[in-house]
Image: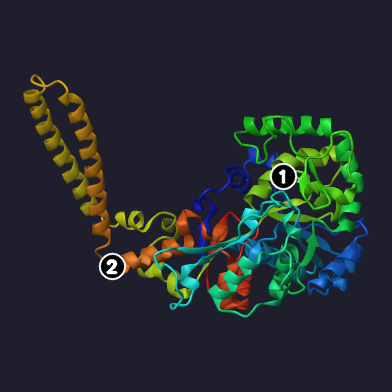
Amino acid sequence: MTRVPLTQYPGMNRFVLDWLAGNPKATAFVPRNPETPKPRNNKAPIHAALVESNKHWGIFAREAIEKWQRGETVTLVAGQQVGFAGGPLYTLAKLATLIKMKRDFEAQGTPCTAFFWLATEDHDFDEVAQLNVPVSTLAPQKDVNRQLDLVCMRAIRGADGRAAVGSLPVPESLVTQVLALFDIPRPDWLRSGFNFRDSFAQLIASVAGSEVILVDALLPDLRRAGASLFGQIHARREEIQAALNARGEELKAAGYSEQIVPRDGDEYTLFYELDANNHRLPPAADRLPDAERISTSALTRPLLQDFVLRPDIFVGGPAEVAYYAQLSTLHDLLGVTMPRVALRGHALVAPKRITRMFERYEIDPTEVFSSPEALLTEREPQGVAKIHALKAEAKRELMKRIEQIGELSLPADHSLAGSIQRSIGHLEFHFEKLAERAIKGLVRKDRERFAAARELVATFYPDRHVQDRVVGWFAYWCVYGSHLLDRIVEEIEPDSDHFRIVEL
């Protein structure tokens, strides 16, 4: 087990880092409240619909859902887009965080219900209809380019570019690619004609069992339960726009940026309307569609969740935590109780043979967020310094000779000035490239160490992206099965300012 500060995680949201550290500038927008909540009642009567929809996906949780409905349990909520084959690794990290928190509460004698919100109304087809597979997880005989970090499978966007993705069928081209790449029979969650919602939900059910209850964002009963909230948002939209603008200025004054910006620099998007084909369209300003035809935006989706499910704790990624910095002003305005906000646990995964390279080659985990050459350059300071010194010395000598050439030739032919300057530019470029190649050759002379650095970077920072943000967890699931989730649940730290590298 390796534990690393989130400050070392590339691209981590600055607001979230300040918030985790308890900086008053950040906690003024989203409080940090680690106290154990008490169960709340007054839930919307959607339990029957939840029971039936979950049973459809293979989750039999009537008793748990009815206990929640009676207000007998603490409520946890997280959510994610319904990505093909389960989406990126951080989706599994969210599930693991929910399961870990649920088990911890119950070990302390506090009954708990964990919900996972399926963001079926999103329309980002390109993000949903792809899967990145680490080349290292594929069998050696697979015909793939072994110089690549990832194999990317994706489907081409169809004509329904504005359609809510949850209702769209999973493209057969994606199914064909994944079955061929992993040499597996067609699983039930990839049945012909399945849409993204049902495919994702059934896969999650097969992985997490009944510990987590799934909530379809487009469930009609859920939408009807939110009708009064929708009506209030519509009636008070000018107040809401003003409150969001004021909050944006407050965030800016505190040194932060808005996570969600106004549309065309004018208004914040609050709703869309779903037409008969589930296309998301801007709603008419003078009327409110039926609740079942309303599609929430990134700003109003958490409000609907908090209004209907009344969660005690919301578990989100960095962007979602930052959403609440904007949203907390709307919770106050609309009288919606804001849950305690917790950051999902962050986990990267790798087989033992890879994680053991850290110790064997004395490589710090934070060093893998670069390139193999940059990682190893620091271990050759004398050689690298010598190359830079020789490059500088050679450039000085060459520039001196070019200057002498100019002194002799320019009086005779003034047109040579431009040629000389162009030649200097070319020579400087090639000097830099030569030095760069020399340094690469230097750090690669220890082939075993370089191969280890290459594999570490390819595993944790493929194509210069942090592993959990791009790599599909299904690739590791095909190798490790239930051990993958068990290990992440065991190691993950909910609401922590550190991330874990989990050894499989």
Residue 40 against residue 273 in the figure, above or below = below
| Residue 324 badge | 1
Relative to residue 170, is residue 459 drawn left or right?
A: left
Q: Is residue 363 above or below residue 141?
A: above
Query: Whole-percent x and y of residue 187?
Result: 67, 77
Residue type at mark 1 is Tyr
* Rendered position, 470 above or below 203: above
Q: Residues within 10 Å of mark 1 (few under 14, many from 20)?
A: many
Q: Report the mark closest to the observer, 2 or 1.
A: 2
Residue under the point 63% across and 72% down? 485
Mark 2: give few (<14), some (14-19) or many (20+) Cα within 10 Å: few
Provide residue 445's location: percent of width, then percent of height. 24, 63
The residue nearer to you, when weighing 102 against 234, is 234
Q: Which residue is disc 2 drawn over?
A: 447
Q: How is the image coloured?
A: rainbow
> How many labels sit on residues?
2
Q: Residue at left 62%, top 54%? A: 126
Residue toward you, 74 or 258: 258
**Closer to the camera in the image, 337 or 189:** 189
- Mark carried by residue 7: none
The quadrant where residue 365 appears: bottom left
The location of residue 349, given as percent across then percent down, is 53, 67
